[in-house]
Amino acid sequence: MERETVFKRRLGRHYDELKWLYCELYEGGIGKFEELCTRMEKRSRERSAGLKRLDKRREERPDWYKGNDMVGMMMYTDAFAGTLKGVKERLDYVEECGVRCLHLMPLLDSPKVNNDGGYAVSDFTKVKENLGTMEDLRDLAEECHRRKISLCLDFVMNHTSEEHEWARRARAGEKEYQDRYFFFDNFDIPAQYEATCPQVFPTTAPGNFTWLEDAKKFVMTTFYPYQWDLNYRNPDVFNTMVDYLLNLANHGVDVVRIDAVPYIWKELGTSCRNLPQVHTIVRMMRMICEVVCPAVLLLGEVVMEPAKVVPYFGTVEKPECHMLYNVTTMASIWHTVATGKVSLLKHQMDVINGLPREYVFLNYLRCHDDIGWGLEYAWLRKEEMEEVPHKRFLSDYFTGKWPDSMARGELYNDDPTSGDARLCGTTASLCGLEAAMAEGNEEEIRRAVDCDLMLHACMMTLSGIPMLYSGDEIGQLNDYSYRQDPAKAADSRYVHRGAFRWEDAELRKNPETAQSRLFAGIGRLQELRKKKPVFSGGASVRTAETWDPSILCLVREYGGKKLVALFNFSGKPGTAWIDEPGTYEDLLSGERIEGKNVAMPPYGARWMLR
Ligand code: GLC
């Protein structure tokens, strides 16, 4: 009885807007809207007592995830610990890493080959057999909650695998299921789409459509040919996908990463990205979660420039995502590593610092995907950097072809027509640790570790949630074994998706090793970040001029405290010619330093507090 009133109260708060948006998108869809509400009520009833308590707590404290103690880590279940049960057994290590939010890469049922690392889902209600069961997922979530760790999972909503039941039935000719995708008898309409719709994987999966020989139809496949785009014009698609989402929430998932969200609405004559209907759908998802499972957060995956990312926060009255990736800053950081010039990064941070403080960004150095060079070229042109040659330089630098570069990355979707290529590799390999270790060059090893730590310090200075990539905490190197696996060989992203090296993790206990320096160093950054209120999201943040092209300065101010953070992106010593009056304590070295003319070691970082 009590539960029903809670559901009704929560629904009441959003009912008018939800119904309005729904019926506008799905003209005459009132029957389908009622069906949606019925499903929501059922999922609400089904939620466990524990999750209901969490709903209530988080509803009362909606800022629960915004503290500076929040640190995330993303990982593949099989690479880290084989199975979900394995992850549960390894949670002590996860806790030792200071992690408060664990993002497990896609783990729902997907084909053995043609699965895009799990991003081609064949059953949204079932865990991939080799990883465990839905029960194991629930168990893991409960154990995480006991340890105050939130669980994040992907919701791959743009497409299904060609092996999903809907796809099989569509292929077999069932009209009802063909209508859940984009099916065409000939290439007339696809050709019109192709005229305005760019390609995601121009080399590994050219074009946006795939010919199905057996069905004698074209199907829309924006990503890989085996990932069929769902048609969200069809209310059955929306209703059912939402139901799957709520089912995951009911298994204890706290954060839902909405994968490839800009792509979910297609319209002829457009780029088929970021269309207004996408925002309607995300807004509806937000309201639906607030009604059924208010404990759950939405993390949008929008790999685009800030002007396109920010609208996914919605407005204060009508919020969409709770969190978004700070992707341009990530790419700018790597650009800065290659060029040794901080001007673009400084400009980028000025853009981010100018946004409302309520926006929560997820900051990261590396993730499971490639690094795309979506930099602000109009701005770089002022510094005489043209897009095509600059991308060529970045590719050469990070694959170690550039003189003196110790970076070891691999290119991804190298497109000869546009001169565009993206980049793969682990943080440590891109910082030069792999090459230095291969050479057995102690000095270079030290430099690579310094660079890696400086980048982590820089990332953790930003407001928002730092998201570590599993393995980075022990400087895990590229893993080239994917080349021997025919299912993976064509996709160089697997170079940074190698099995977690537990034997290297053991080395964190030996202070002589690079692993230990990184593990302790990153751990220390987190500890300080957690302890000092100046890192809170409420702080005001600005950059300051250092008059040294390689040194970035970020100033955070909060509660009468001031942090002057300095980062040297050069392998040579430098001086930050700043003027921030007063004496500071450098939290990283323990030194007392005047806020003037600060000497910076190669790849040095300082967190100066007063
Ligand atoms: C997202 C994922 C990426 C995947 C794509 C298609 O961009 O991060 O790994 O290939 O979506 O699902």
Image (cartoon, rainbow, N blue to C red):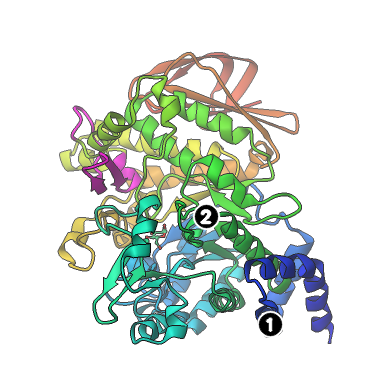
At x 33%, y 61%, the residue is 500
Direction from residue 443 to residue 301 in the image, left or right: right
Q: Is residue 368 above or below residue 131?
A: above
* Quadrant for the N terminus in the image: bottom right
Give residue 352's position: percent from left, percent from top.
58, 36
Residue with the mark numbered 1 = 31
Give residue 187's position: percent from left, percent from top.
31, 65
* Quadrant for the C terminus in the image: top right
Residues in magenta, as a range: 401-430
Q: Which mark is residue 72?
A: 2
Mark 1 to mark 2 CA distance (whole Å): 41 Å
Label 1 crowd bin: few (<14), some (14–19), many (20+), radius 10 Å: few
Amino acid type shown at disc 2: Gly
Q: Which mark is residue 417?
A: none
At x 33%, y 59%, the residue is 191
Magenta residue check for 421: yes
